[in-house]
Image: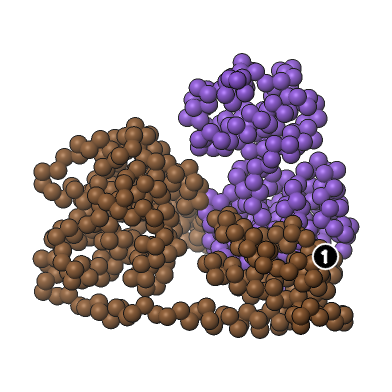
Chain colours: A brown, B purple
Amino acid sequence: MRERPDRDGVAGRGPLPPLIAFGRDLRARGLIVGTGRILTFVRAVAALGLADRDSLYWAGRTTMIGRRDDLETFDEAFEEWYRSLRPIDELGVALNLPTAEPGSDEAVFGPEPDDLEVQVGQAAAEWHGADEDEEPEPGEESSIRIVASGAEVLRTKSFGDLTDEERERIAALIRSLRLRVPLERTRRTRRAPKGDRFDLRRTLRRSLRTQGEPFDRAWRARSARRRPLVLILDISGSMAPYSRALMQFAYAAMAAGRRVETFVFGTRLTRVTRTLRTKDPDRALHEIGRQVEDWEGGTRIGESLKTLLDGWSQRAAMRGAVVVFCSDGLERGDPELLRGQMARLRRLAHRVIWVNPLKGSPRYEPLARGMAAALPSVDVFLSGHNLESLEHLAGTLGG
Amino acid sequence: MSGFPFGSVDELERALGEHRYLADRGLATAIYLSISLGKPLLLEGEAGVGKTEVAKTLSELLGRELIRLQCYEGIDASQALYEWNYSRQLIAVRAMDAADAATHVEDLFGEDFLVERPLLAAIRAGDRAVLLVDELDRADDEFEAFLLEILSEFAVTVPEIGRVAAETPPAVVVTSNRTRELHDALKRRCLYHWIDHPQLDREVAIVRARAPHVSESLARDVAEAVARLRELDLAKLPGVAETIDWANALAFLGADGLTEELATETLGAVVKDHEDQQLVATRLAEVVGEDA
């Protein structure tokens, strides 16, 4: 490493603290920024050799985040951080960071444990601990009791009629449901004793044992994987008695594979997949409650679905997915919009299952305009008002 | 890395421009950093904003070979890294005398029978190449993990031949259309840049650079119309590629500006979804800017 001229004289502070502090800011805003990213950021600032606003912004944006959804958070954090800097002085120093020269091989074969890495690591370690030591939620997890005798009664009791204690017990039961998502065939092939494709590679290997005579032929077959599962849950006011139970169901669904996405909507759509991946279900639900602004408000099913299809049909792997739509179909928006969007969903997805808690009532007929508009595009129409019906749902995914 | 002749982002931006790629400051910075720091550049953005073009231009600019790995569902190591030429091997085996076979088996797994795929080619070419891993989101998780390994080491062990390593890694551009989210591990290894639709003036300049026979006035009309299209509620937003296509189509018809009639005839060049076309058709005057 080259000798660094000691110009860290600005009030005794080196160039690193403000840059590292930016990483901490981003973390505080919920972005996943590890030491590696911060290190790259510092190197990027040094490589640009300029400390103007543009360079800092782009150096940060290319190194600190990795998804478009984080852009807004990043921009806000940057604004604030940049304003907090004492301009020029501190950043002038940043240019003297020890770094591999642009164009040298060192940088390329990276991570050499240099000065910089050690410094960033240490600084980050100081606040690492602080961040992770969040106070635990008052412990409820041990309260999940084993339900034996009352279980049968509970299974058929509507979610709307539960007492608080029953609600807790049911929640645990729902979470332990196991969903089996159907398989789809992929284009990837695997070795198989019998298959529809000739495995030249292995055949050749075997032929070497028989003087090049390919007696023993080997085969490959296309493999299978779980289809994506997409849950779309209505959390508007009219669904209030059921939405908590459905969220528990969503939590259980997360275990069904890696390709599971959950969205909730009332008047607008919110993706909660990442929150549901948390280990502690109570905490996840608590967090979602904060995230979702329109909990128990009005319903705009068509519009929310449209947002989903416009924005997420590409990313969330809706193509070929099993889609579970939980809503009472009481649409306040235009039912024609809903009809069109449901048709779109039907074209994308492998199977559309609509779960309507109202269907649990024997007198129910799908007369609500929203429900009537959606039904032509629904493959399976189920109730979802009690545990038994959710068990049925878990079993129906496979078709 | 040798042969990176740009001292600053400005210089790089200018040089890209000379190669008819008009990058904004953010993209130019991302490319500059990617090469300076030796990290792969992950580009995401709507279809048709010029992600793939970045790698092509970069290879021209640096005078390096472009090695492209197009990802698709089901791609695996034998299609991306290397494969043996089994048919040739079979023939060779059968041509051997039984007595020879033992001594010649090694020859079967030599260079002559190795089919080099893009990743191996890139490792061997090292910094003489720009590696484009296109549409990585189409490949599956397993392939992504495999690619991560390659990008970390730029070395691979072919059991029969030995270890092949790049002296200096190639420049790497990875693109994704976000049909699914890539894994964080891969993202951490890369620099990230989201390419947005360009600003109006830049889009006009891009059309002019990419389709020089399109007049300035037509280019501006088209870019403005596309900007309005992007504000409509379309399922598939037109990208820069569509803007250029549309301008080309109009220029081919001898147009010097955009009218509602011309737009109707050529709409298919820019709006490529049936329902979108129906929507646009009802609001064409507004899109063309004739309703005022």
The crowd level at tag 1 (other Cα within 10 Å; few <14, some 14-19, many 20+) is some
Left or right: residue A21 versus residue A152 is right
* Residue A157 figure quarter: bottom left
Q: Residue at x 25, y 55 (%)?
A: A240
Tell me residue B42's x, y (percent).
Answer: 66, 57
| Residue occupying image coordinates x 10% and y 66% | A153
Residue B160 found in image quarter: bottom right
Identify the subunit bearing mark 1.
A
Q: Residue B85's spot in the image, x, y percent? A: 68, 57
Quadrant holding the N terminus of chain A: bottom right
At x 32% / y 80%, what residue is drawn? A139
Residue at which label 1 appears: A49
Q: Is residue A118 left or right of residue A2?
A: left
Q: Is residue B177 above or below residue A78?
A: above
Give the camera-side residue of B145 and B52: B52
Quarter occupied by residue A305: top left
Above/below status of B161 relative to A132: above
Question: Looking at this view, is B96 or A45 the one in front?
Answer: A45
Counting from the top left corner in percent of width and height, residue A315 is at: 50, 51
**Residue A89 in the image: above or below residue B182:** below
The percent coordinates of residue A171 (x first, y second) are 25, 67
The reply to whether residue B107 is visible in this rendering is no
Left or right: B144 in relation to A366: right
Q: Secondary structure at mark 1?
A: loop
> What amino acid is at disc 1?
Gly
Tell me if residue A90 can be seen: yes
Number of marks in the rendered image: 1
